[in-house]
Image (tube, grey):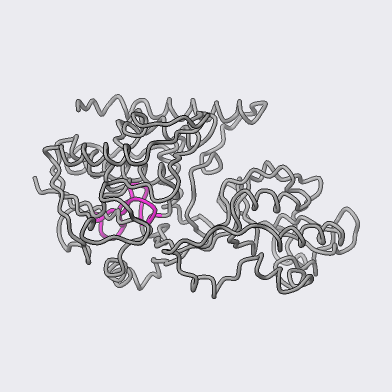
Amino acid sequence: MDAVKVIGAGLAGSEAAWQLARRGIPVILYEMKPQKRTPAHHSDDFAELCCSNSLRSDQLENAVGLLKEELRRMGSLILSCADAHRVPAGGALAVDRFGFSAAVTHAIRSHPNITVVEEEVTRIPDEGNVIVASGPLTSDALSDDISRRFAGANHLHFFDAAAPIVTFESIDMSKAWFASRYDRGTPDYVNCPMTEAEYDCFWRELTQAKQAELHAFDDEKVFEGCMPVEVMARRGRDTLCYGPLKPVGLPDPHTGREPFAVVQLRRDNADSTMYNLVGFQTHLTFPEQRRVFSLIPGLEGAEFVRYGVMHRNTYLQSPGLLNCRYQVIDEPRLCFAGQMTGVEGYVESAASGLVAAVELAHRMLGLPPVDFPRETALGALAHYVSDPRVVNFQPMNVNFGIIPPLGYKVKGKRNKNAALAQRALDALEPIRANEQIED
């Protein structure tokens, strides 16, 4: 059997290599470290955690907690090593970053089905099965090759400029209303009105809010074509009222008059469970985004499923390019995994590597495809990045907003999420049971 080439030994690549190898499939894992590093890298080990050492919540009532439990049940190397090297962090799973990466590296290098090649891959191999898991800081040469390969479809982005996203059910619709400007077309936008006093308070806090630290590997030039909302606000007290908060053509049905300012939210998924704040690309820290944007009438209790980000992040326009198995639709031998696909976060990257590898292993072994159900967190992520109905595709953390609703009422958010989690684990069980792999 020919070896699968896996490019990149980050969380996605390490997980993919492990899942293939434990199913008896030979793997050649390419990693450019230690020969070459980006400014974000500080270790020669695999699955290096370049930022936080937290893998976030470990509670089943939280979507990322559910995703972690699904990964555990599927025999994830990343979760096994994380659990073995956890450090106290309340309800979160945080790890000793060096112990964790060392454990992943040892497992990968010790597996008889994995051959590690320490060299930079500058172009996608023309033959054989390949999983590209080179991460958001993919080297320039490989990025150029991917860009050339998919240039005709404009499938590669080199920075991430995304507005915050909130759940629809957390918007106070007693203060907001549906409408499009001048009533043109269908009433697709949620509109949150502001009085002059409310706007002044919001504007003042926005202009003074703390920005995220710019890392050495972030490219400030990415901001030139997409101005952060806080930078726009600092240009003058009324600037936003002539830009994204323009109230013209949006009379408040509660008063019959145009408000002083209006924040619009646009549907972000086909199921209408998530809405993004239009024009609110931002470089504020996540706590500051929650604090300042919660000053907007109607968003006082908003649940943020994604915060705004502006940083270098090479990712694909995956809907229309990839299917729910992370395969390139027009070139099935080629898969992508990790943040390049549009999943965001450590756990999500590992999840994409697992799904891509399990699906590829089934094809190579002549087994039926798995096709993780959308009701699972693993499947929901895979369907999010491959769903052509996704509006304004941007990288996304796992959240219950991308998982189909229950179809019946459950009192209380925690209880509802617990029911979604139990449904997901029930849906995963037949898949897990059929694998029957002995490590």
* Quarter assignment of residue 54: top left
Residue 406 vs residue 24, the one in the foreground: 24
Q: The N terminus appears in which quarter of the rendering?
A: top left
Magenta includes 391? no
Q: Nearer the viewer, residue 220 or 145?
A: 220
Is residue 37 placed above or below 299 in the rendered structure? below
In the displayed structure, 436 sits above or below 187; it is above
Who is closer to the viewer here, 83 or 335?
83
Q: Quadrant of residue 94?
A: top left
- Stretch in magenta: 322-341
Return the residue found at the far left.
1
The image position of residue 202, as x and y in percent, is: 77, 58
Q: Which quarter of the figure has residue 334?
A: bottom left
Q: Position of residue 280 (x, y in %)?
A: 64, 61
| Residue ID at (51%, 39%) | 403
Horizontally, residue 211 falls left or right of residue 178, namely left
Q: What residue do we see at 44% from left, 45% from top?
A: 381
Locate the C terminus and report the quarter of the image it occupies.
top left
User: For the image shown, how many numbered marks are present on the structure?
Assistant: 0
Residue 251: give x, y in percent of width and height. Answer: 84, 62
Q: Position of residue 65 (x, y in %)?
A: 48, 33
Asked whether 336 falls inside the magenta stretch, the response is yes
